[in-house]
């Protein structure tokens, strides 16, 4: 059987699997509550793998692994390690149990509702809705671009055709089944990702260009030394590590995974599972990317449309590594599974938030839960289409993701995390953290759109510094939340800070 036949059969089986899960779950996804949080009874394996598959997509495997590996050599594996330790282990330890308890007790189904319950008032809620829907779009688009670059290289299919196929798969799982369907699909897709990454590492390490683990590590160590990384490069590397690790702490679609966990026992088990998953998948993905300079001496060596573009490094590495037809099929399904699960999480979060927290309460207050679910499914379709349009721009994968993560985490990480534990944070502090983080993370986006040549001394173009500004936004927004809350309290702010109902009581 030819490689193309094997690949298309493998993809066909996967699409049938996704459609089946969507159709089965559709019977249990009648209301907006069913569509967004299911029955809040997810176990550790399902929750952890759903978290991991939402975390890692083709953006990581293709955009970040290739880009960081090429720029930093063997040091490019650090983001993968950071994702496991900080983005999974520490995130679950700090956020999961408390988030599960609060959202279950107060029947919270979205991040805007979280802030409304804690701080009150509609303006903050509406600000959250707008930021979530608008700035999840470039992240969604980056997932499309990451996957289509692989399909274009390995299948020789036009990128726009690939995007349409991916959009259809994501729409099927989301519109038909909602949250319950994504959990079931993510469990299987998580297993596929684990097996696929391990098989891919083994195949790449054994290929001619690498020549085995010890020889490959020795060779890439020499290549890394030849890069002569300076202070600016090390700052960029650690900015990437911190943004891709701690950035997840403020992403609504990641926080949403904690809402449906069954109990604290499952939280503890999920912490271990998610950490191991991240170590294998992210660590393995970045390790493969770190070997890119063993395949090419210059980006200009990349063939066709990929010439000079880091987005095409990993796809061309895989194409030249001599992988078997079956393994190429597994790799494609691995990347499709990772990407579709991420797209599903992003789409459900953005669309359900817009429905629950704006369309229904502001425009159609009499709408029942069943109609709300249908409106949400319609918005899911709109979101998928908008993502497709943005994905056809010429913005690199890494840039689109960093813009999205920077704005979202800069806006939400500090007030969300602090509000979970500190009763002293008040509305003034929360607003300061949100707006301050938003504005600090915004310059790369603004420069990309309007001032593409604007630059900072020693660091380069501002449009290319998304991770730098994202990290700065996360740190300074924490300081703003605390400082302004204390100042407002001292000044006798009329806004009550403690809100005891938010921190006490029994689960509903």
Image (tube, helix red, strand yellow):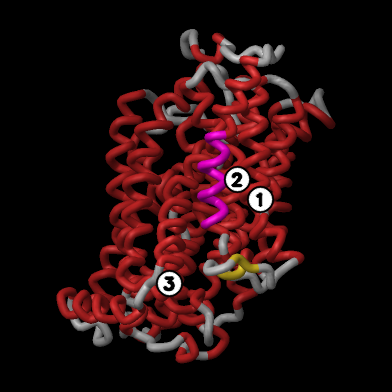
Taking the image as shown, residue 321 lies to the left or right of residue 186, namely: left
The residue singled out by tag 1 in the image is 135
Is 463 in the magenta? Answer: no
Q: Residue at x 53, y 65 (%)?
A: 398
Q: Residue at x 62, y 61 (%)?
A: 141
Taking the image as shown, residue 43 lies to the left or right of residue 119, namely: left
Q: Does the residue at mark 3 contact the one at mark 1 (Cβ under 8 Å)?
A: no
Q: Nearer the viewer, residue 444 or 489?
A: 489
The residue singled out by tag 3 in the image is 66
Q: Earlier in the sequence, mark 3 or mark 1?
A: 3
> x and y percent of residue 212 in the render?
18, 78
Crowdedness of circle 3 by 10 Å Cα count: few (<14), some, many (20+)?
Answer: many
Taking the image as shown, residue 303 lies to the left or right of residue 375, namely: left
Stretch in magenta = 468-479
Q: Does the residue at mark 2 contact the one at mark 1 (Cβ under 8 Å)?
A: yes
Q: Nearer the viewer, residue 260 or 81?
A: 81
Image position of 371 with respect to 55: above or below: above
> x and y percent of residue 64 in the render?
46, 65
Image position of 26 with respect to 371: above or below: below
Whole-number angstrom distance, CA of label 2 to CA of label 3? 24 Å
Give the numbered dot on residue 27.
none
How would you classify the magenta stretch by its main secondary structure?
helix
> x and y percent of residue 43 in the render?
36, 33
Whole-number angstrom distance, CA of label 3 to CA of label 1? 24 Å
Q: Does the residue at mark 2 contact the one at mark 3 (Cβ under 8 Å)?
A: no
Whole-number angstrom distance, CA of label 2 to CA of label 1? 7 Å
The residue singled out by tag 2 in the image is 408
Q: Secondary structure at mark 1?
A: helix
Is 474 in the magenta? Answer: yes
Crowdedness of circle 2 by 10 Å Cα count: few (<14), some, many (20+)?
Answer: many
């Amino acid at each position: 059987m030819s490689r193309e036949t094997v690949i298309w059969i493998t993809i066909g089986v996967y699409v049938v699997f996704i459609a089946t899960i969507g159709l089965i779950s559709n019977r249990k996804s009648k209301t907006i509550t069913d569509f967004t949080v299911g029955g809040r009874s997810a176990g550790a394996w399902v929750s952890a793998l759903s978290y991991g598959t939402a975390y890692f997509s083709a953006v990581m495997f293709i955009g970040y692994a290739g880009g960081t590996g090429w720029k930093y050599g063997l040091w490019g594996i650090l983001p993968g390690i950071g994702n496991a330790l900080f983005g999974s282990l520490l995130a679950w330890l700090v956020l999961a149990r408390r988030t599960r308890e609060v959202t279950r007790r107060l029947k919270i189904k979205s991040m805007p509702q979280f802030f409304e319950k804690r701080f009150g008032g509609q303006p903050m809620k509406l600000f959250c809705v707008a930021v979530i829907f608008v700035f999840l779009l470039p992240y969604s688009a980056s997932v499309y671009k990451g996957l289509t670059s692989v399909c274009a290289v390995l299948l020789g299919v036009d990128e726009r055709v690939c995007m349409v196929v991916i959009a259809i798969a994501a729409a099927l799982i989301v519109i038909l089944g909602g949250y319950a369907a994504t959990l079931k699909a993510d469990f299987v897709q998580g297993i596929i990702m684990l097996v696929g990454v391990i098989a891919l590492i083994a195949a790449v390490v054994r290929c001619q260009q690498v020549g085995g683990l010890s020889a490959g590590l020795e060779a890439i160590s020499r290549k890394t030394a030849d890069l002569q990384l300076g202070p600016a490069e090390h700052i960029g590397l650690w900015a990437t590590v911190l943004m891709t690790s701690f950035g997840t702490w403020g992403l609504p679609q990641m926080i949403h995974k904690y809402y449906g966990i069954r109990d604290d026992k499952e939280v503890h088990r999920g912490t271990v599972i998610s950490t191991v998953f991240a170590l294998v998948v992210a660590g393995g993905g970045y390790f493969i990317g770190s070997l890119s300079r063993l395949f090419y001496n210059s980006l200009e060596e990349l063939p066709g449309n990929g010439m000079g573009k880091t987005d095409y490094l990993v796809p061309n590495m895989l194409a030249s590594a001599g992988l078997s037809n079956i393994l190429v099929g597994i790799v494609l399904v691995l990347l499709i599974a990772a990407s579709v699960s991420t797209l599903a999480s992003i789409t459900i979060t953005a669309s359900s938030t817009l429905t629950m927290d704006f369309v229904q309460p502001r425009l159609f207050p009499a709408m029942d839960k069943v109609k709300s679910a249908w409106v949400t499914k319609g918005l899911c379709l709109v979101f998928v289409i908008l993502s497709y349009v943005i994905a056809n721009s010429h913005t690199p994968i890494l840039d689109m993701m960093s813009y999205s993560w920077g704005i979202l985490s800069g806006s939400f990480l500090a007030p969300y995390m602090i509000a979970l534990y500190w009763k002293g944070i008040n509305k003034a502090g929360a607003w300061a953290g949100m707006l301050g983080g938003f504005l600090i993370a915004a310059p790369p986006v603004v420069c990309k759109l309007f001032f593409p040549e604007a630059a900072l001394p020693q660091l380069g173009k501002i449009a290319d510094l998304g991770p730098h500004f994202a990290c700065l936004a996360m740190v300074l927004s924490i300081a703003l939340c605390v400082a302004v809350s204390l100042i407002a309290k001292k000044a006798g702010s009329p806004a009550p800070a403690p809100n005891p109902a938010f921190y006490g009581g029994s689960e509903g």
